[in-house]
Image: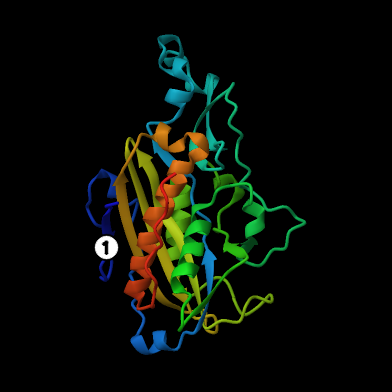
Amino acid sequence: MFYLQLILPPMKSYCVLLPLLFILSGCLATPIKPSPHRMDEIRTMLVVPVEPPPLEVTPDPIESRFPVYNQFQYQSMPSSVYLEKTVYKNPGGVLIAGLLSKDDMMPIANIHQTPASMEKIAGLEPTASLSENWTPTFTLAQEAVSQLNGERIKAILSKHYYHLPMASGDRNANLDNWRSAIEHWYGLNISSVDYRRHGLEQVDAVLEVGIQTYRIFNAQTSLQVLIKLIDPNTRQVIGRISAKTLSVEDSPESLLNDEAERFKWLVADMGAHLVSQGLSDLGLPVKAPADRLTP
């Protein structure tokens, strides 16, 4: 399958004027290309997924799920009477920022806290706390491990994910809050997490995998993958790269029906190619992404 793909070039700073689907909410931090000598020293790596934002869908799925939404008597009423903007979970476990009607059966997502009974690490949360959700960065982190593992590098998938530093009140359907938190994480030159502590795996480097652009706009799905490489001994960010792509596929309804299996496959496939390109651009030896059977 062909994807329109872009790897952002190194420069002091950049805000690229792109077609509508590729317009960024702000400027991302400067890419960092590690030295070949530093990369040759890496033999073991911990891969950590970063908390992703909810999916953005335009037009809002409420229009197909709640057909009377377009009727005049509803349009003439204040939307707050019968609609609520929130983050909800569809039957496939995908978290979506959008509208729910008062009679909607979609459950509101619990994204504010991790159960107190689960182990916490400063800046990290256990991946088990999100086991009931489909989390795209978990899939991409697993893909990175698969592509990295070989004769030279042993990659390990972390049992924790990077928890975005957001106030509970900001973890809502306002996607600007998520974009700001992701840009802040991506822009850090010193990791906020001390990966040497708390009994984490002892490795030569830590790879954090996050996403920024994550949306369906009519029949176009766009995804942006952000990758950071960290020296766990100094907490210094030694590599940083961003890559993005879009695919023209089915409508949001078709992608998100049947427990969103088609959508999950599409994001995994797009993401695998972006991860491969990003790792290669950092100078890491990778295996080609495996072919996936279309659901």
x 63%, y 43%: residue: 110
Taking the image as shown, residue 139 lies to the left or right of residue 119, namely left
Q: How far across and down, in percent of the image, does residue 190 sit?
A: 48, 75
Image height of 128 relative to 250, above or below:
below
Q: For mark 1, give the secondary structure.
A: loop
Q: Quadrant of the C terminus?
A: top left
Which of 110/273 is in front?
273
Circle 1 residue: 14
x 30%, y 51%: residue: 1
- Residue 222 visible at all: yes
Which of 95/277 is in front?
277
User: How many numbered badges does the structure rendering display?
Assistant: 1
Seen from this angle, which residue lies furthest top? 73
**Scheme of colours in the image:** rainbow
Q: How far across and down, in percent of the image, does residue 91 sit?
A: 56, 36
Image height of 64 relative to 19, above or below:
above
State the image quarter where residue 197 is shown.
bottom right
Q: How far across and down, in percent of the image, does residue 80 sit?
A: 52, 23
Image height of 178 relative to 262, above or below:
below
x 35%, y 61%: residue: 273
State the image quarter where residue 198 is shown.
bottom right
Which of 144/13 is in front?
144
- Residue 241 visible at all: no
